[in-house]
Image (cartoon, rainbow, N blue to C red):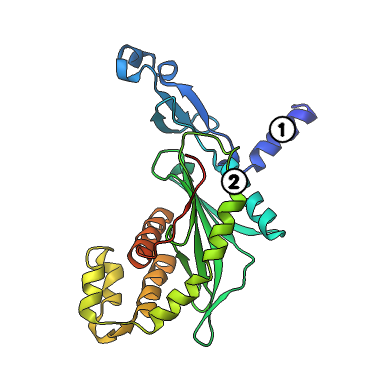
Amino acid sequence: GLSRPLLLLRRNKMSTPAWRQPVIVVPLQQVFPDLSEIKEFRSKVCIFNHDRTKLFDVVSPRYHVIQHAEAFDRVEEGLEAYFKKKVTSNIRTIDGGARFRAEFKLPMRPIKVGGSDVSEITMVMQNSYNRSLTFSAELGAFRLICSNGMKIGQSFGSIKARHVSGVEGWNILDAVDKMVLNAPRLKEVWQEWEGQWVQYEEAVELLNGQFPDKYLTPVLSEERYPRTKWQLYNDLTSFATHDVGSVRRRMEFDDRIASLFYGDAGIEGAELVD
């Protein structure tokens, strides 16, 4: 049988989530020697999962891989240092671990709209190994009355990093501070939306072609109009949260809704790496 140290090593490896396993970067010509004759491929590198059973991408050697675990730990540490308390998180991966999403519940005063419509403030972090997502962390919210998740998007501040450097130089605290200071403006925006009425024709113009018909048909039922902008926004976050079957589609819908509703807020994000 295996010695005790080897058993412990195997047990620890099995208990470690796949997203915490480091990816491996290997020269392409080492993996596919036949391609070394093609000039365009000679300097490329392959990004594999930890046991080299899945190829995530083929990239330039200048591309710096931001590991999911490394980025998550830096953001979590930054949030806990800023708030001086533990933060909870919910983690999802898709595409065999290529794409990563973490939602942190921020220990901030919830936002109340109207009498009892309460939303908790969150931070949504994402990263990828296949260039489908750049690293970013943006404000989000969780509406308690209907359990709708929301992604606010870059307009209320964001943490962004290009894949050209490591995480060592990230100034997380300053970036979090800007986002936290901007968060109270959400209440002002949502309260304004409560008083803005959207006619049926306006909703059709805004949403037509943005989402599949099976999600839009109930939202664009003419007898439901006029609706407030806040009601319409929550119609969309409701189907994105509860009716979408895949994490990939949920992420796409969250980004699209944020762009439609917060695209003109005009607050700059914080760029961590030039």
Residue at x-position 37% and y-position 16%? 42
The answer to whether the residue labelled 2 contacts the one labelled 1, judged by CB atoms less than 8 Å apart, is no
* Badge 2 or badge 1: first in the primary sequence: 1
Reading the image, the residue beneath label 2 is 171
Query: Disc 1 residue type?
Result: Leu
Comparing 224 with 136, the one in front is 136
Query: Which mark is nearer the camera, 2 or 1?
Result: 2
Residue at x-position 57% and y-position 63%? 180
Q: How crowded is mark 1: few (under 14 residues within 10 Å), some or many (20 or more)?
A: few
The picture quadrant where one finds residue 43 is top left
Q: Total number of numbered labels?
A: 2
Identify the residue at the far top of this view: 37
Query: Disc 2 residue type?
Result: Asn
Identify the residue at the far right of this view: 4
Horizontal arrangement in the rendering, residue 224 relative to residue 77 (left or right): left
Horizontal arrangement in the rendering, residue 261 relative to residue 180 (left or right): left
Residue at x-position 46% and y-position 54%? 269
Horizontal arrangement in the rendering, residue 85 relative to residue 212 (left or right): right
Kindly report the distance in space between the C-alpha atoms of the residues bearing marks 2 and 1.
34 Å
The x, y position of residue 30, in whole percent, is: 44, 16
- Secondary element under disc 1, as helix, strand or loop, is helix
The label shown at residue 9 is 1
